[in-house]
Amino acid sequence: MKNSGLVISLDFELLWGVFDKVDFKEKKVYFENTLEVIPKILSLFEEYEIHATWATVGMLFNPSWQDWKNNQPDQLPSYESEKLSAYKFSEENNYSIPKSLCFAPELIHRIAKAPKQEFASHTYCHYYCLENGQSISQFKADMQKNIELAHKNGLNIKSLVFPRNQFNEDYLKVCEELGITSVRINPTNWYWNSVAENSLKNKIFRTGDAYFGLNDKSYKISEVEFYKKSVSLQKASRFLRPRSSRFNDLRLKRIKQEITHAAKNNLLYHLWWHPHNFGNQPDQSLKDLKVILEHFKICRKKYHMESLTMNEVYSKAQQLHKSVENL
């Protein structure tokens, strides 16, 4: 690859990503803000010609609770901890959760129609691939339902982000079978190991890394690994944490330095976040995003840095690997 690249992926989930961690009755405004901020993110992406991958929970395709019931996969995840099940959660709340917290078909189509945006999978039900009780066949059924609904809406899924970064190497076989060619994986730093356990020590180091540390998060296109030569494994570099009034300037400085380092050294830098991370301070969060995109604009002009989706990274990495094999 001649140029460096900024890769952006967003995990679009609404309530399905956090239903086991929050009281949805207290999050109505938070998710209303999220729905309003997504078109504004798309506008910024269009203004700065940003290619981005939207890893979307498939349940968001449903327009109503009745559609949601009709679209259940053949097998449901049998987690030992039932509080992790989106199906149990919905049933226990008598399907009375506001639709705006759980469904967004119109917004999905808006994302899919926006220029240079890739629609991708975050599984159908925000499926946890490292939790006890669930199985690979249940994961496959979940993904098949996600792909089925995407096809019904004229969309083709090529990229996947495992929910809560629970990357399970054993499940790459399913990805290959279903035509998934790009998977986001975790950074190689030790504190990103054992994400299912999510120890306090790991959380502390991940938080601290957002503000201090080495510029060690970017990597060469040649370092993108493949599963059976067909599924690219793309490391995340940086989670764009929700803004902090105390350390916000430091957080943004860290990201800009890392983008500059990648641009100067012909590396990929993969930035990701959830749209709902902008839910508490949407206007300020959009301003922060614009600061990052302005900095990228400088790097694009000065160092010819590219903006890339996950699928575009796959194409470049695949081309490079084939050229090496032909030497």
Image: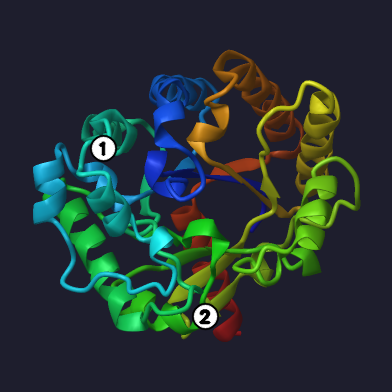
Tell me the tag on residue 169. 2
Residue type at tag 2: Glu
In the image, 72: left or right of 43?
A: left
Q: Which mark is residue 13?
A: none
Q: Name the residue at the right extreme.
A: 213
Above or below: residue 273 compared with residue 327? above
CA distance for labels 1 and 2: 30 Å
Q: Quadrant of residue 251?
A: top right
Which of labels 1 and 2 is toward the front? 1
| Residue type, mark 1 in image | Phe
User: Label 1: how many residues lie within 10 Å, few (<14), some (14-19) or many (20+)?
Assistant: many
Residue 23 left/right relative to 285: left
Q: Mark 2 packing: few (<14 Cα in 10 Å), some, or many (20+)? A: few
Residue to which mark 1 is pinned: 103
Looking at the image, tell me whether mark 1 or mark 2 is earlier in sequence order: 1
Q: Quadrant of residue 196?
A: bottom right
Residue at 68% x, 38% y: name it.
Answer: 241
Residue placed most toward the observer, 269 or 49: 269
The residue depicted at 44 percent of the width and 20 percent of the height is: 29
Q: Between residue 18 and residue 291, name the one nearer to us.
A: 18
In this picture the colour scheme is rainbow
